[in-house]
Structures are given as C-alpha cells and as structure tokens.
C-alpha cells in the first residue's frame, strides 16, 4: 500500500477540519451563478443573495449542522430531472 500517494497532507487536513464561518457561507452563496434554475425548494441563488440579511442565520445553521453531523440532508442534495423531447 505504500505505492499509493497520500492525496491530502496534514496541514490540508487540519484546514479542512476547521469550523465554517458565516462569512465563508455568505461568500460561497454570493459566488454561485444567479441564473441557475431553482432547486427543489423553488428558490434560486438570486433569492438567497437578495434576501441574505433575512435568511443568513438559517442557511448558516444548516451548513453548521451538516458539518457537525458529517452528513447532508437528502432534501438538500436532490434535484429534478425533466425529459425534453426533441423536435424534428
């Protein structure tokens, strides 16, 4: 097994295990493209950036809960797939 390279070195692992700050969550939300289709909750990224002052605590709590539990709610990781027929 010594022939398999270690992909994450110690200092990277320490960095990955740091608590996530509200500023990092906000930066991640603001860096997402606004024109994306809405998710299963019906909200676009534009909604979250426009109303960030209202929803920031809840969004940050969800991120923190996911980090603490090392899991993501299924509802946060779902999407809709739609078949679009080709026109001839």
Image: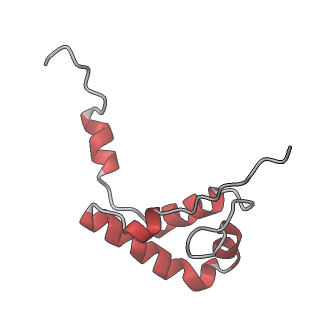
Closer to us: 33 or 15:
33
- Which quadrant is the N terminus positioned in? top left
Looking at this rendering, what residue extends furthest in the right direction? Answer: 88
Q: Is residue 15 above or below residue 31?
A: above
Residue 73, percent from left and from top: 37, 69
Residue 34, percent from left and from top: 72, 62
Residue 41, percent from left and from top: 56, 76
Residue 1 placement, left or right of 49: left
Q: Residue at x 49, y 75 (%)?
A: 59
Q: Is residue 1 above or below residue 18?
A: above
Residue 39: quarter of image: bottom right
Count of numbered labels shown in the rendering: 0
- Which quadrant is the C terminus positioned in? top right
Residue 37, percent from left and from top: 69, 63
Looking at this rendering, what residue extends furthest in the bottom direction? Answer: 54
Closer to us: 21 or 67:
67
Q: Residue at x 61, y 82 (%)?
A: 53
Q: How is the image coloured?
A: secondary structure
Closer to us: 84 or 62:
84
Looking at this rendering, what residue extends furthest in the top direction? Answer: 3
Residue 66: quarter of image: bottom left
Closer to us: 9 or 32:
32
Looking at this rendering, what residue extends furthest in the front direction? Answer: 88
Q: Residue at x 56, y 71 (%)?
A: 40
């Amino acid at each position: 097994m010594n022939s398999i390279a270690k992909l994450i070195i110690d200092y990277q692992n320490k960095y990955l295990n740091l608590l996530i700050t509200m500023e990092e969550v906000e930066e991640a939300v603001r860096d997402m493209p606004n024109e994306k289709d809405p998710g299963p909750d019906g909200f676009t990224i534009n909604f979250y950036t426009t109303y960030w002052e209202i929803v920031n605590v809840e969004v940050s709590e969800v991120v923190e809960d996911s980090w603490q539990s090392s899991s993501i709610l299924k509802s946060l990781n779902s999407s809709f797939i739609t078949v679009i027929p080709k026109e001839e």
